[in-house]
Image (spheres, rainbow, N blue to C red):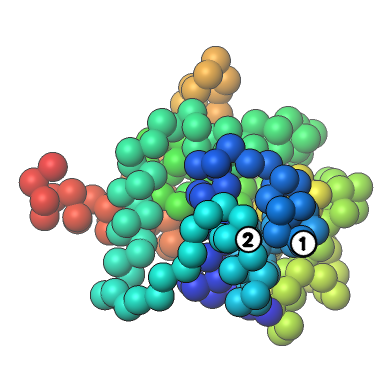
Amino acid sequence: MPSTRLVTLLGATVRQQRHLRELSQRQLAALAGVSQAAVARIERGERAPTIPVLERMLTAMDVQLAVGVEPLDAHLDARMDDLAARPLAERIDELGLDRLLDRLSDLPQVLTGSTAALLQGAPVPVDALEIAVRWQDSKVLTRWLERNYGQRWNARFGEFGGVWLEPEEPGEHRWSTRHGEIRATMCDELPETIEVRHGGRGYQVVPLVELELTAPRAGELLRRYRDRQLASGS
């Protein structure tokens, strides 16, 4: 089933409530009578929970779902406000960013998109690791995906799997792996970067000013947040 705003929002809500109660995915799964894999896919927005499953998960955390309507994209503003209030180190750790980058150490790449914006302090949602990879390194990427149970996004069926892994094959450069989702921008040469440091670790990232020009989704989010800040006088 294709991921939608509502599926993503439900997944984020389940994850937030689970963290508030300091439950692991395995513990929540046991309480709700579902598999840990199902909890993980729901939280990542890869699977739409049925109403009974969602109710069991929320009931296990002593909360219930309230349904309402709001102005279009108000959820996005609220999410960015929430991210702005959270420590950056916490957000980096939640994404498992360092673990995934350590496993990609043999692949020449730099961070771009929303991942690069996050590391520069921007309160933008990050749903996957976004990297820039040279076409000449595509075989290295393919071999890594094969070793790590990669599945490529299948736009026809709205799910991962059933299409060729290789970046040269038609389709979005988006893969699910056992370590998390990866989205790649394939290019002839890696873009210019700057280094940012967090927790004693350095990251090579595309600067914010370049992201606004070259990364449509991240650029849109950055402009939206900046415009709201200007409008509020912050």
- Which residue occupies the extreme top position in the image? 200
Q: Position of residue 29 (x, y in %)?
A: 73, 54
Could you classify mark 1 by the number of other residues whose Cα lies within 10 Å: few (under 14), some (14-19), or many (20 or more)? some
Q: What amino acid is labelled 2 in the image?
A: Met
Q: Are marks 2 and 1 in contact (CB under 8 Å)?
A: yes
Q: What amino acid is labelled 1 in the image?
A: Val
In the displayed structure, 234 sits above or below 228; it is above
Q: Position of residue 11 (x, y in %)?
A: 57, 61
Q: Residue at x 77, y 62 (%)?
A: 34
Q: Position of residue 214 (x, y in %)?
A: 44, 56
Question: Which disc is residue 34 wearing?
Answer: 1
Considering depth in this image, is 27 or 1 the residue closer to the camera?
A: 27
Which quadrant does the N terminus fall into?
bottom right
Question: Which disc is residue 57 wearing?
Answer: 2
Judged left or right of residue 34, residue 226 is: left
Question: Which disc is residue 21 wearing?
Answer: none
- The secondary structure type at the circle numbered 1 is loop
In the displayed structure, 93 sits above or below 189; it is above
